[in-house]
Amino acid sequence: MSIQYDVLILGSGAAGQSLALRLADHLRVALVTKRSIADSASSWAQGGIAAVLDATDSIEAHIQDTFTAGAGLCDPAATRFVVEHGKAAIEWLIRRGVPFTREDQSAIGYHLTREGGHSHRRIIHAADATGAAVQATLTERVCAHPNIHILENHIAIDLILGDKVGRNGEGCLGAYVLDIADGRVITIAARSTVLATGGAGKAYLYTTNPDVATGDGIAMAWRAGCRVANLEFIQFHPTCLYHPQAKSFLISEAVRGEGGILRLPDGTRFMPEHDPRAELAPRDVVARAIDFEMKKRGLDCVYLDISHKPADWLREHFPNIHARCLELGIDMTREGIPVVPAAHYTCGGVVTDLAARTDVAGLYCVGESACTGLHGANRLASNSLLECLVFGEAAAKDIQARPRDPIAALPEWDESRVTDADEEVVIAHNWAELRRAMWDYVGIVRTTKRLQRAQHRIRLLTSEINEFYSNFRVTNDLIELRNLVVTSDLIVRCALERKESRGLHFSRDYPGLLDEALPTILQPRKT
């Protein structure tokens, strides 16, 4: 089966959906999502969106806070571009009906909160479920738009490149996409293709990410010949709920921003010993401090305590967190919440410019898959949804300016030389081994020896997975595992390249900072 669109968007988070809406009045758009259209990391975001909205705040202050969190590695042009477009992005969401939390006493009419690393209250939010509110609003509009064709339960296998199909120099022409339900492979041709596939949290054993975060866009772009950068900077969120039934449930940064205190099991506060900003230090500092205390004392978790705040206030400001904790027998109005660090955000990714263009003509990348230069060595809290929206708009403008050349027919997917898999257990086993190796050897604190061990295991797994891919029909699990092992290898390669400790990358072998902050950029070999 072969179909054609003006634009093919892979991924249905805030980046993909906002981009689709900006394009659909003028172009036919296909929106491909691995599960339901609402299933993305964006919908899990609790805290909010950072933007300069209050008169006491400033563009320069937001830029400086981003630079400070990014440990000197943020790209100045990209950072200024995002921050300067922040207010317009929020206004665009408000016009589309996102129900941000209001505050009558505020000059702007909305409540702004503060999170770690920010010098001002600049986080606009919808209670403690901002991502879900944004996603629900965008989804309603996407589903109602006649020019957006949604393909749920579909996963991209690989990009289609002109050089691979006898049309040299034409860049990306679309993608092969698997219909997960019936196993058919669809050929989708498009003038422009956008990777909006999210991060790679599922490379790790413990993560705040949804199951779909398997590094698909990063791996596909790398195979297509795109550079990737700064993948050593995996942000570990300091406070993931620690409970056997609480899979990947995040305790928002805003809990610490509103006065939450991190304590040991005996009630002792420990963050002031690690950083003068205490609980308001950037996430990498807090995650390392918790990791240090847990390992030093043999703890399973620490506790985030905001029970000193009035119970009614907590229920109003954190209704989602309060309700989920209560379901598990934890009353945050009376006791501390058990928390541990978990892999949360992929700061690096596919190298893009200020129009979200990659190294391959016709291929764009937005959201967590991209490395725009905004986050540097550590993402400042609530800058991620902002980046999705700003670069979604930038990509839309560039795509609409492209010539409307005819869309040529593409060759169908060839599975004439493969069979159905006989041992699916191989995939499950390799997946578990990969995630354990990444957690043990490429975690919050690293050494060269650990990284080399991880690299050795990953390359053995890569060989096994590639052999499996070459001989058997593709499935959702096989595609995700293939992408995850590529992305994991790139994370390790970037980590081995960096001979210092900066931001989220902390190496015991190189504890100091180099004089100059430089990105880690990997270039694929030409085939």
Image (tube, grey):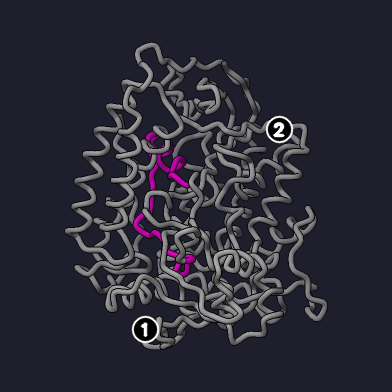
| Extreme residue toward the left, this view | 449
Number of marks in picture: 2
Identify the residue position indicated by label 1 in the image.
274
| Extreme residue toward the top, this view | 416
**Relative to 200, is 161 above or below?**
above
The x and y percentages for residue 364 are 53, 41
Question: Which stretch did the figure color magenta?
Answer: 213-241
* Residue at position x 35%, y 23% in the image: 421
The picture quadrant where one finds residue 20 is top right
Is residue 353 something that shows in the picture? yes
**Relative to 345, is 423 above or below?**
above
What mark, if any, has residue 95 been given in the picture?
Answer: none
Is 332 left or right of 145, judged from the image as shown? left
* Residue at position x 24%, y 56% in the image: 496
* Residue at position x 64%, y 66% in the image: 323
The x and y percentages for residue 117 are 51, 76
**Relative to 258, is 492 above or below?**
above
Mark 1 falls on what kind of element?
loop
Is 42 left or right of 214, judged from the image as shown? right
C-alpha separation, residue under disc 2 versus residue under disc 1: 52 Å
Nearest the eye: 498 or 320:
320
